[in-house]
Image: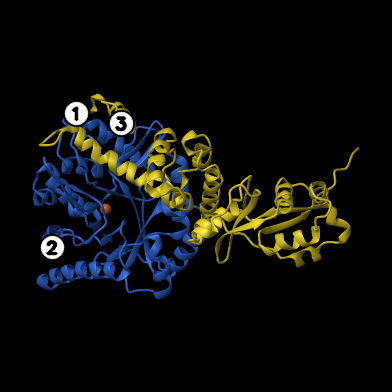
């Protein structure tokens, strides 16, 4: 098993079920893979057979979508225990979740739902993250989510909210550049200012993904669909911040309308070329 | 508004379409609060509907995607997901189908959905060793009567008063119209299990269904043979047992410890 940590200058690819056999058999030249932890909550079968094989050759990142960190329900200990078992088996280099909620009164809506940026939310989320980190015995990363609405009783900006949470809980930030861009367009703020307020020392991973532009009579809403290539504006933002967040590895995410694996390799190579440009400019 | 209240109202707004006071908390900026919330509602229903059509592909193909999706929308509201793992969603769809009068045109659909669910469970179940019939040689024939079997965790059986295997086979093999099964023909039983080459759905006779059921209840081989012969005195037990082992679903054999009466 590959045991060294995921290197700062590396570019990983989000691995979905349909590509597992291809990856296990062909061992493409990819730095590391990120999986959705819940896809491996089953006890056995092909998903685990492939992942065990893939883990021999690649480092992994476990990205959770179902822990519902921001929920005011009790923390789902059963969910967390299964995650802990999987971490024990596969020894991933990174473990992450989202700054959102998805369940209430025991009902799981299975979406990354928006939170009001209030002191109440900060205290609640930071203590939940601390509990998760205590139970898992490791630092986790939390990802900034795409949102389609803002709450009028929010007391601060998204970046102030994020900074308070990482400061109080000691967790790291999984900075999704596409999500910042989507929110900047949906809620009209300057993404560059957002990035300038995020301390590079807390960013442990960067996400890049494609989104959908939905034009309605009232205006445009951008929706985080992960079903296409990273758009030009997001690549430009990535280029602009690559230097600032050089210590964080990058991941290409693609979840729906999954293309041939070579398309993902191509996206990863584009990300790598921006990183190399930055390095040669620095030299 | 407190976070807990906000989350409860958001959920009610999504699932029941109620006009809750959450709307007054949403910044409009060119859109109505309702429109912004409906982006989430659409995402959630799309995810959950897609999850169901992925887990129940054969049922979905049988009734058509449009019909399946409208059924899914009702199911999502009446059987909201209770797990953070989407793979757990859909467990009650077969019984929900059974209880829907609108589905009386598809009286076998509930059994079909049960097979879909069993395939999904089998796909994700833990792996186990498969014994072949020669393993019986490890035991003295004197003990055969007292043998008990453990099965591969992926195993599931479905019994229907409809020709459910023929219907499944038709739906999964892109069959031509002239091979449409007559749903008035005799009922059938199927065995679902996972082998090395993947999840299998096989047609089994009623007697073998009875044997498996009895053994899964931890009845001894002797008691199982007796109840199977009660069903059909002509049944060839040896052939049935051979067939059972050929599926690779028996994972352990033990001799029942006799209870000593004092
Ligand atoms: Fe992301």
Are the residues flagged by discs 1 and 3 from a single subunit? yes
Tell which tag, 3 or 2, sits nearer the viewer.
Answer: 3
Q: Residue furthest right?
A: B262
Alpha-carbon span between mark 1 and mark 3: 12 Å
Give residue B127's quadrant in the image: bottom right
Q: Is residue A115 left or right of residue B219?
A: left
Are the residues flagged by discs 2 and 1 from a single subunit? no
Mark 1: which secondary structure? Answer: helix
Q: Is residue B219 left or right of residue A274?
A: right
Chain for numbered disc 1: B
Mark 3: which secondary structure? Answer: helix
Contact between marks 1 and 3 (CB within 8 A): the answer is: no
User: Looking at this view, is A99 or B151 the one in front?
Assistant: B151
Chain for numbered disc 2: A
- Tell me the tag on residue A239: 2
Q: Is residue B140 visible?
A: yes
Q: Which chain did the renderer colour yellow?
A: B
Q: Residue A155 location, x and y as percent?
A: 16, 32
Contact between marks 2 and 1 (CB within 8 A): the answer is: no
Q: Is residue A1 visible?
A: no
* Residue at position x 25%, y 30% in the image: A120
User: Looking at this view, is B99 or A60 the one in front?
Assistant: B99
Q: Residue A60 location, x and y as percent?
A: 37, 62
* Residue at position x 43%, y 33% in the image: B78
Alpha-carbon span between mark 3 and mark 2: 37 Å
Contact between marks 3 and 2 (CB within 8 A): the answer is: no
Mark 2: which secondary structure? Answer: helix
Residue carrying label 3:
B7
Q: Which chain did the renderer colour blue?
A: A
């Amino acid at each position: 098993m590959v045991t060294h940590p995921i290197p700062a200058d590396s570019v990983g690819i989000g691995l979905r079920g349909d590509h597992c056999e291809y990856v296990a058999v062909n061992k493409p030249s990819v730095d590391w893979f990120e999986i959705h932890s819940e896809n491996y909550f089953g006890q056995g079968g092909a998903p685990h057979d492939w992942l065990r094989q893939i883990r021999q050759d690649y480092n992994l990142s476990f990205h959770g979508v179902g822990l519902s960190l921001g929920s005011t329900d009790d923390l789902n200990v059963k969910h967390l225990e299964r995650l802990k078992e999987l971490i024990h088996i596969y020894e991933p280099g990174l473990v992450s979740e989202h700054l959102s909620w998805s369940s209430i009164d025991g009902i799981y809506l299975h979406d990354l739902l928006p939170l009001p940026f209030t002191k109440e939310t900060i205290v609640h989320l930071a203590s939940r993250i601390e509990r998760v980190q205590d139970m898992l015995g490791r630092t986790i990363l939390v990802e900034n989510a795409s949102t389609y609405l803002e709450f009028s009783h929010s007391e601060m900006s998204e970046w102030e909210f994020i900074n308070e949470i990482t400061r109080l809980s000691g967790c790291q930030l999984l900075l999704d550049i596409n999500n910042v861009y989507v929110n900047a367009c949906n809620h009209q703020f300057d993404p560059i200012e957002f990035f300038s307020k995020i301390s590079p020392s807390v960013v442990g991973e960067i996400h890049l993904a494609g989104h959908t532009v939905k034009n309605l009579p009232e205006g445009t809403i951008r929706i985080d669909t992960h079903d296409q290539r990273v758009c030009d504006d997001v690549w430009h933002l990535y280029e602009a911040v690559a230097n600032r967040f050089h210590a964080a590895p990058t991941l290409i995410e693609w979840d729906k309308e999954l293309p041939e694996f070579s398309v993902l390799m191509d996206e990863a190579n584009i990300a790598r070329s921006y990183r190399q440009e930055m390095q040669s400019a620095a030299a | 508004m407190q976070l807990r209240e906000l989350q409860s109202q958001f959920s009610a707004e999504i699932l029941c379409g109620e006009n809750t006071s959450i709307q007054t908390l949403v910044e409009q900026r060119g859109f109505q609060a309702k429109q912004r919330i409906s982006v989430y509602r659409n995402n959630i229903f799309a995810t959950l509907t897609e999850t169901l059509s992925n887990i129940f592909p054969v049922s979905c193909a049988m009734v058509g995607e449009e019909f399946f999706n409208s059924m899914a929308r009702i199911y999502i509201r009446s059987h909201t997901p209770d797990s953070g793992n989407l793979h757990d969603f859909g467990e009650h769809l077969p019984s929900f189908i059974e209880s829907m009068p609108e589905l009386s045109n598809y009286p076998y659909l509930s059994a079909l959905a049960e097979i879909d669910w069993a395939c999904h469970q089998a796909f994700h179940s833990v792996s186990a060793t498969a014994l072949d019939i020669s393993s019986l040689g490890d035991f003295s024939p004197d003990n055969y009567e007292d043998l008990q079997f453990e099965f591969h965790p992926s195993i599931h059986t479905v019994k229907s008063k409809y020709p459910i295997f023929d219907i499944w086979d038709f739906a999964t093999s892109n069959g031509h119209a002239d091979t449409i099964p007559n749903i008035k023909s005799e009922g059938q039983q199927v065995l679902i299990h996972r082998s090395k080459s993947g999840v299998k759905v096989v047609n089994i006779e009623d007697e073998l269904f009875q044997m498996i059921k009895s053994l899964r209840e931890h009845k001894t081989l002797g008691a199982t043979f007796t109840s199977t012969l009660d069903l059909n005195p002509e049944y060839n037990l040896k052939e049935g047992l051979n067939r059972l082992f050929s599926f690779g679903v028996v994972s352990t054999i033990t001799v029942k410890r006799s209870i000593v009466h004092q």
